[in-house]
Image (cartoon, rainbow, N blue to C red):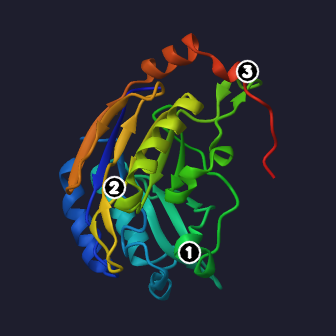
Amino acid sequence: MQPLRVSLVQGSTRWHDPDGNRDYYGGLIAPLAGQTDLVVLPETFSSGFSNDAVHGAEDMCGATVAWMAKMAHALGAVVTGSIVVREGDRVVNRLVWMRPDGSHDHYDKRHLFRMAREHERYAGGSRRLLVELKGWRILPQVCYDLRFPVWLRNRYDREAQRFEYDLCLFVANWPAPRREPWRTLLRARAIENLSYCIGVNRVGTDGNGLEYAGDSAAIDPVGTVLTELAWSEQVHTLALDPQRLLDHRERFPAWRDADDFELL
């Protein structure tokens, strides 16, 4: 594991405006070329979090995935965030993990936010995604997934002698009225899983009148806040120290007392 430079991109997503959002976020991240390893955009960064976005859903050959490939190549870094994707008769809230060479993986949001009736328009995913970058194992997730600790549990593989992941990562559209659960759960997920935790949220007001406070943050395995962004548009890059993680896991091996379970 090498130090990992992560850029938190906290922007004010335009409502139902994919072209405008690609231009907007492209302008925010262009200065990061050669300065970062991982660029993290918010949930549904090309449209905003909207049930009506299903009507403009793209496929994996669409303009936004192509834009992500172009930006990853130009920056020399992984670019990730979620977009609305159509696959046949299914529409999913899909996190795309785009590498500089154009190869990519994806994760479909498993837990759909029923309070906004997301589950009535979108299909949920069924598998976790684990990706590697600079020796780090990373678990990328989407917004409401943050509330479900069983799904996120970081198990120790005794045969491989390693944890499933070293960093859990959340992209979100998490409204300001629920900002305290967001801030609290990011810390809880880091502490209980002996991992770094990063959450990237949006700011501004969406087409439904919901206000977003941002509060994008990076948390270390002890629960210490390494950075937390305020209510405004911001792009912040920090380096995650692998030794800080390894030392804590050695000093505090709580995983040895964890309960075994099977996720159905």
Task: Verify CB contact (< 8 Å) between mark 1 and mark 3.
Answer: no
Q: Is residue 218 above or below residue 33?
A: above
Q: Which residue is mark 1?
A: 118
In primary-sequence order, the first of circles 2 and 1 is: 2
Depth order, front residue of 65/240:
240
Mark 1 or mark 3, earlier in chain: 1
Which mark is drawn over residue 257? 3
Residue 195: give x, y in percent of width and height: 52, 31
The residue mark sitting in front, 2 or 1, is 1
Amino acid beneath label 1: Glu
* Residue name at image x 56 percent, y 28 percent: 194
| Mark pair 2, 3: CA separation | 43 Å
Tell me the CA gap for discs 2 and 1. 33 Å
Three-letter code, disc 3: Asp
Could you tell whether 204 is left or right of 182 in the image? left
Residue 155 quadrant? top right
Q: Label 2: which residue?
A: 73
- First in residue order: circle 2 vs circle 3: 2
Residue neighbourhood size for the residue with mark 1, other residues' Cα within 10 Å, grouped as few (<14), some (14–19), many (≥20): some
Q: Tell me where residue 84 appears, x and y as whole percent.
A: 49, 74
- Residue 164 picture location, percent across and down: 64, 35
Q: Secondary structure at mark 2?
A: helix
Q: Quadrant of residue 63?
A: bottom left
User: Mark 2 packing: few (<14 Cα in 10 Å), some, or many (20+)?
Assistant: some
Q: Is residue 49 left or right of residue 226?
A: right
The amino acid sitting under disc 2 is His
Q: Is residue 33 visible?
A: no
Q: Compare residues 243 and 50 and report the one nearer the observer.
A: 50
